[in-house]
Amino acid sequence: MNTVHSLNMPVVFIGHGNPMNAIERNEFHRGWEELARRLPVPRTILCVSAHWETQGVCLTESETPGTIHDFYGFPEQLFDVQYPAPGDPALARRVAELLATERPYLDSERGLDHGVWSVLVAMYPEADIPVVQLSMDTSRPGLYHYNLAKQLAPLRREDVLVLCSGNIVHNLGLFSYQNAMPLDWAIQFDTEVKKRTLLRDHEALASYNGLGQNAKLAVPTPEHYLPLLYAVALQEENEAISFFNNTVLGSISMTSIVIGGD
């Protein structure tokens, strides 16, 4: 039976950035810790991450999802991180029910990628809240993802935290580890997206290629931007929005958003 409460659980979009944020005690890691203290404790978590791209829609159904280290060239300490949160097959089936027209595939083998655990290891270090991950078919346009996400709205009254993990601006090809000074075009696009979010201009956000001349630089590929649409799609009329980790590093925006709550 689904637990139904009168108040909506907030929705979160996280700019996750470098996987090292999982283990470095930097401003972003601390921001995620503080976020967890601000939020009501969820019964379970549904994550949408930039790092699970599929044909069609898939959900993790494992009772014990593994920790996927889907990167290379980082210190061994990062590969040693394990995030043994339980899965929630009942939530996976509930989400599949809400998205029935897409005929989601329930994957009993796949674990949690770093777009999920690098954030959750800071937010919920005890790994005691069940987690399910929803994939993205990045061959589909922004409006498809926005409309798909709208169907998840009932989860907010069922103590499910919908956590969307990507980056508003993400251009690794133009990123320099030697110089993290924010690039002008990256600041402009990040500012434009924040403005459209506050205005609740979801149509413009879904049609992100039309968000000014810097859109193609900011979103050269869609996977890091699309999780934002899953968050804003669940925003109700007149619902509060707040930003945190409000920083641009070179060509990557760490801007994160909380929808709802106080």
Image: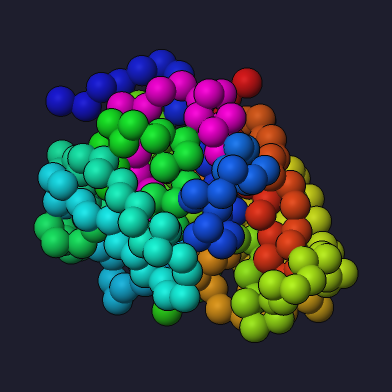
Q: Is residue 33 left or right of residue 219?
A: left
Count of numbered tags: 0
Q: Is residue 227 magenta?
A: no
Q: Is residue 16 visible in this depiction of the protein? A: yes
x, y percentage for residue 154? 36, 35
x, y percent for residue 199 = 75, 45
Q: Residue 90 appears at what percent x and percent y?
A: 15, 39
In magenta stretch: residue 41: yes
Q: Is residue 169 above or below residue 215?
A: above
Check the image and report above or below for 252 versus 191: below
Query: 236 or 186, which is in the foreground?
Result: 186
| Snapshot quadrant of residue 159 | top left
Q: Residue at x 53, y 58 (%)?
A: 20
Residue 215 visible: no
Residue at 48 percent of width and 39 percent of height: 122
Query: Is 192 situated left or right of 112 in this image?
Result: right
Q: Residue at x 50, y 49 (%)?
A: 23
Q: Residue at x 34, y 56 (%)?
A: 80
Chain part drawn in magenta: 32-48
Q: Residue lying at the far top in this picture: please name it.
A: 6
Q: Quadrant of residue 110?
A: bottom left
Q: 45 or 123, which is in the foreground?
A: 123
Q: Quadrant of residue 220?
A: bottom right
Q: Quadrant of the C terminus?
A: top right
- Please provide percent x and percent y for residue 45: 34, 39
